[in-house]
Image: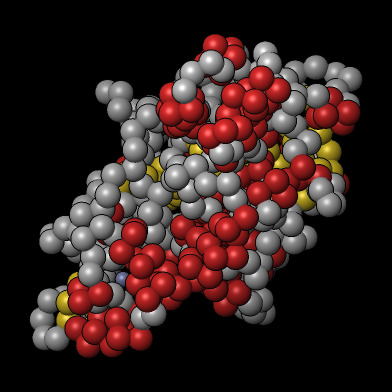
């Protein structure tokens, strides 16, 4: 996406999670729109230090300390500030740093998917340092489309490797190449990588075969979650479609299927394709949080949405689907160009020409610009950073529900570490119950709203094994009673 995240202007018509309405001494928090006690807004503001206050102002243009904020927002911003302080000074600035997922969603790093294996179905993969250093966490690599695939294939960058490398690192990367900044929420999970196609095409039946492989190898690798950031070729009823049935089988076997809903929200029928359209699948749409922390400015990404051909509403939840940091494939021309552009960005004027001359034939545009004035070279460098969405020499920002799904997958991995006996449907129900709606946005497009990792993990911890517990009737009832109205 080319557009810039625009400043957030607080709106007056908020509703949010209204608690207590507008009667008496309550008022909406200007940052999240929740109704809270008017005193809370004032008292929280009085306790705010100047640095946190500055971060809030930077994320919610127009906000002033006298506007106040709720205690929960104050906590979120203080935690984000601590996280940013820890990591940002060591990064090359591009003028517009992309916030890491944990800071955006207020996720803690207490749980990191330890003891959980996540399978990924995608066009191809790469043994990225964020997954294999200091400890190799890839348990198995398999190619559904041909025999003879070997783990060593993951060492060679291939055009088909990009997408799966990004989805797997968004969920399970440890931020190795970013000093830990761009760490996925499941940074200690183990991975099983299942190649189901190429960058040109991933066939409907190959995704089905991939899911069937995952089910067959579930016990061997301890697979608890499968992330599917790809869709089938056509809409189909789950009653007759083999891919949808494979997804239902996976759920029955104890694997949570987490699928991207697709990016067709702007086309007339905004179709939801299998396996995202299957009933038991946890289907994820995109949030556009403008790369900011103030909930009042949240908007929706143009994700596909239901009803499906079976009349099911999808997606169930949303997560950041734009401004998501993802790795650049090492060893490619793109990576070499990004490294040179970022090196020039950090170089003093006097070094620009020398630096270009020392790296010939990396980027023809830069070679051609070597004789220009420093100001012109800087313009070109700035245009390249923006045009290629570069964050650092190793990361860029990307968009699509392909990246929202792995974020939810990583939250599910945190939940399974917190409570390994949760069934796939219990994980799904908790994520739905704890999600928070984006105010003013259509319910059909966001389901139950933005996932809340901290609340989801807390709910997972609360569901301790009880002798009388069956398939969590309490949770199921609560979901039904909350409804979608
Ligand atoms: Zn608030």
User: Which residue does the image show at 34% across and 59% down from the upper left?
Assistant: 58
Q: Residue 393, relative to residue 373: is it above or below?
A: below
Q: Nearer the viewer, residue 125 or 73?
A: 73
Q: Residue 476, relative to residue 356: is it above or below?
A: below
**Where residue 232 sits: x, y (%)?**
54, 24
Q: Is residue 92 left or right of residue 32?
A: right
Image quarter where ligand 1 lies: bottom left
Q: Is residue 187 visible?
A: yes
Q: Quadrant of residue 312?
A: top left
Q: Residue 444, relative to residue 414: is it above or below?
A: above
Q: Is residue 248 visible?
A: no
Picture quarter with the C terminus: bottom left
How many labels sit on residues? 0
Q: Is residue 374 left or right of residue 176?
A: left
Instruction: Check the image and tell me how it is coloured.
Output: secondary structure
Picture quarter with the N terminus: top left
Q: Is residue 389 left or right of residue 217?
A: left
**Please, which residue is most extreme toward the left here?**
23
**Where residue 112 sits: x, y (%)?**
68, 61
**Please, which residue is most extreme toward the front here?**
350
Q: Nearer the viewer, residue 425 or 287?
A: 287
């Amino acid at each position: 996406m080319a557009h810039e995240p625009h400043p957030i202007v607080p709106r007056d018509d908020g509703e949010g999670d209204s608690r207590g309405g507008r009667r008496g001494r309550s008022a909406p928090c200007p940052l999240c729109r929740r109704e809270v006690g008017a005193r809370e807004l004032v008292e929280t503001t009085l306790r705010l230090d100047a640095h946190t206050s500055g971060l809030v102002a930077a994320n919610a243009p127009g906000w002033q300390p006298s506007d106040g904020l709720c205690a929960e927002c104050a906590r979120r911003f203080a935690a984000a500030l601590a996280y940013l302080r820890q990591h940002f000074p060591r990064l090359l600035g591009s003028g517009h740093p992309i916030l890491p997922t944990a800071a955006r969603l207020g996720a803690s790093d207490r749980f990191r998917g330890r003891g959980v294996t996540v399978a990924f179905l995608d066009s191809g993969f790469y043994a990225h340092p964020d997954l294999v250093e200091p400890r190799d966490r890839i348990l198995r690599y398999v190619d559904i489309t041909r025999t003879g695939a070997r783990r060593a294939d993951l060492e060679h960058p291939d055009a088909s490797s990009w997408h799966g490398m990004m989805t797997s690192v968004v969920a399970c990367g440890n931020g190795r190449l970013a000093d830990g900044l761009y760490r996925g929420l499941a940074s200690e999970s183990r991975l099983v990588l299942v190649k189901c196609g190429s960058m040109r095409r991933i066939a409907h039946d190959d995704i089905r075969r991939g899911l069937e492989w995952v089910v067959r190898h579930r016990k061997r690798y301890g697979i608890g979650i499968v992330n599917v950031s790809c869709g089938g070729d056509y809409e189909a009823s789950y009653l007759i479609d083999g891919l949808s049935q494979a997804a239902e089988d996976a759920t029955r076997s104890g694997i949570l299927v987490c699928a991207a809903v697709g990016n067709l929200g702007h086309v007339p029928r905004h179709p939801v394709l299998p396996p995202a359209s299957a009933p038991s699948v946890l289907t994820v749409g995109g949030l556009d949080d403008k790369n900011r922390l103030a909930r009042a400015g949240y908007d929706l990404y143009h994700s596909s949405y239901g009803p499906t051909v079976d009349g099911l509403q999808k997606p169930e939840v949303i997560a950041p689907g734009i401004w998501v940091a993802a790795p650049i494939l090492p060893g490619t021309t793109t990576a070499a160009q990004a490294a040179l552009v970022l090196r020039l960005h950090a170089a003093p004027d006097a070094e620009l020409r020398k630096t270009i001359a020392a790296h010939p034939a990396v980027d023809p545009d830069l070679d051609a610009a070597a004789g220009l004035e420093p100001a012109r070279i800087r313009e070109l460098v700035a245009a390249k950073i923006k045009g290629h969405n570069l964050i650092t020499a190793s990361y860029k920002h990307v968009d699509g529900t392909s990246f929202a799904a792995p974020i939810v997958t990583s939250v599910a991995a945190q939940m399974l570490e917190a409570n390994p006996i949760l069934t796939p449907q219990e994980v799904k129900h908790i994520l739905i119950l704890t999600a928070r709606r984006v105010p003013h946005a259509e319910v059909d497009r966001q389901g139950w709203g933005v996932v809340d990792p901290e609340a989801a993990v807390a709910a997972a911890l609360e569901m301790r094994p009880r002798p009388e517990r069956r398939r969590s009737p309490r949770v199921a009832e609560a979901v039904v009673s909350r409804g979608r109205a």
